[in-house]
């Protein structure tokens, strides 16, 4: 009797499994197909991104290698032409190369005395949420250094503000520039206070602390 009951139970389990297979088999197959499609899509996307990055690297080097040639310096016109090429390249480049190209173009413009073009590019990078935080900070510092006395002091101070936290690697430079802004406004007391903070901060690079010490000597002289 037990054997018969076991056989009946087995038949019922088999019948139930067949019904489940008929009901959900198509869904299981579709799920498996979707997994395969997802994996293939991810691999295609990665390959496509690598292809774009390789192409961008080739284009970037084609523009910058002549600039980096040790044989001689570029004329101002050649430097501006290279900067224009970099700006054009950045328009459709992957994010990393876009930021690099804009920063390099800004440096070229600044070296030729075209600080307006350089400042525009530093502003773009500084406001680009897709760029790395460190690159945004560098762009804002360069803007502050080159535009002091030209841009509004309030604009420069606003750009420096996020860098003033002690954990930021550029906080010493940012505070030094903050002091320069107040000095430019004629607020010597605030400038001296900030230079003193820079001078006394052991986490700030020695070169920056030395400049702050020199500025304090001048202001106290």
Image (cartoon, rainbow, N blue to C red):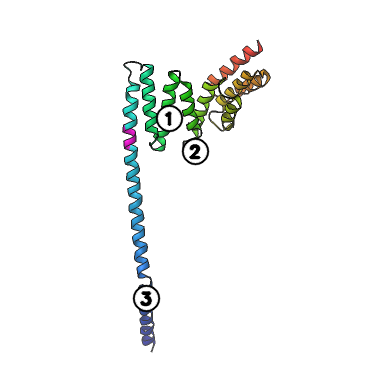
Q: Residue furthest right?
A: 189
Of residues 58 and 3, the one drawn nearer to the viewer in this rendering: 58
Q: How far apart are marks 1 and 3 (CA)?
A: 63 Å
Residue at the (61%, 27%) spot, across then down: 154
Q: For residue 107, which quarter of the picture?
A: top left
Which element carries disc 2, helix, strand or loop?
A: loop
* Residue at which label 2 appears: 129
Residue at the (57%, 23%) spot, across then down: 177
Judge the density around disc 3: few (<14), some (14-19), many (≥20) Cα neighbours within 10 Å.
Answer: few
Q: How far apart are marks 2 and 3 (CA)?
A: 54 Å
Residue 44: x, y in percent? 32, 48
Residue at the (55%, 32%) spot, across then down: 168
* Residue at which label 3 appears: 17
Asked if the stretch drawn in magenta spans residue 34, the answer is no
CB under 8 Å between discs 2 and 1: no
Examine the rendering and report whether any part of residue 24 can be seen.
yes
Judge the density around disc 1: few (<14), some (14-19), many (≥20) Cα neighbours within 10 Å.
Answer: many
Which element carries disc 3, helix, strand or loop?
A: helix
Which element carries disc 1, helix, strand or loop?
A: helix
Question: Magenta segment range?
Answer: 54-58
Instruction: Tell which circle, 1 or 3, labels the residue nearer the N-terminal end.
Output: 3
Q: Which of marks 1 and 3 is in front?
A: 1
Q: In which quarter of the image is the C terminus?
A: top right
* Residue at which label 1 appears: 102
Asked if the stretch drawn in magenta spans residue 57, the answer is yes
């Amino acid at each position: 009797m037990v054997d018969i009951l076991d056989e009946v139970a087995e038949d019922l389990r088999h019948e139930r499994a067949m019904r489940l297979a008929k009901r959900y088999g198509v869904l299981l197959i579709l799920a498996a197909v979707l997994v395969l499609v997802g994996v293939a899509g991810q691999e295609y996307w990665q390959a496509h991104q690598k292809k774009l990055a390789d192409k961008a690297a080739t284009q970037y080097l084609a523009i910058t290698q002549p600039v980096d040639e040790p044989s001689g310096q570029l004329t101002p016109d050649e430097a501006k032409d290279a900067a224009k090429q970099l700006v054009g390249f950045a328009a459709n480049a992957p994010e990393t190369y876009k930021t690099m190209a804009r920063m390099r173009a800004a440096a070229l413009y600044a070296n030729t005395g075209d600080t307006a073009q350089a400042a525009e590019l530093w502003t773009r990078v500084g406001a680009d949420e897709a760029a790395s935080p460190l690159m945004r900070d560098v762009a804002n510092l360069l803007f502050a250094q080159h535009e002091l006395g030209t841009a509004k002091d309030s604009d420069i101070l606003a750009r420096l503000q996020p860098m003033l936290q002690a954990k930021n690697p550029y906080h010493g430079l940012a505070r030094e520039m903050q002091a320069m802004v107040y000095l430019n406004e004629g607020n010597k007391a605030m400038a001296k206070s900030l230079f003193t903070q820079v001078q006394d901060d052991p986490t700030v690079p020695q070169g920056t602390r030395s400049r702050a010490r020199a500025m304090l000597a001048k202001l106290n002289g």
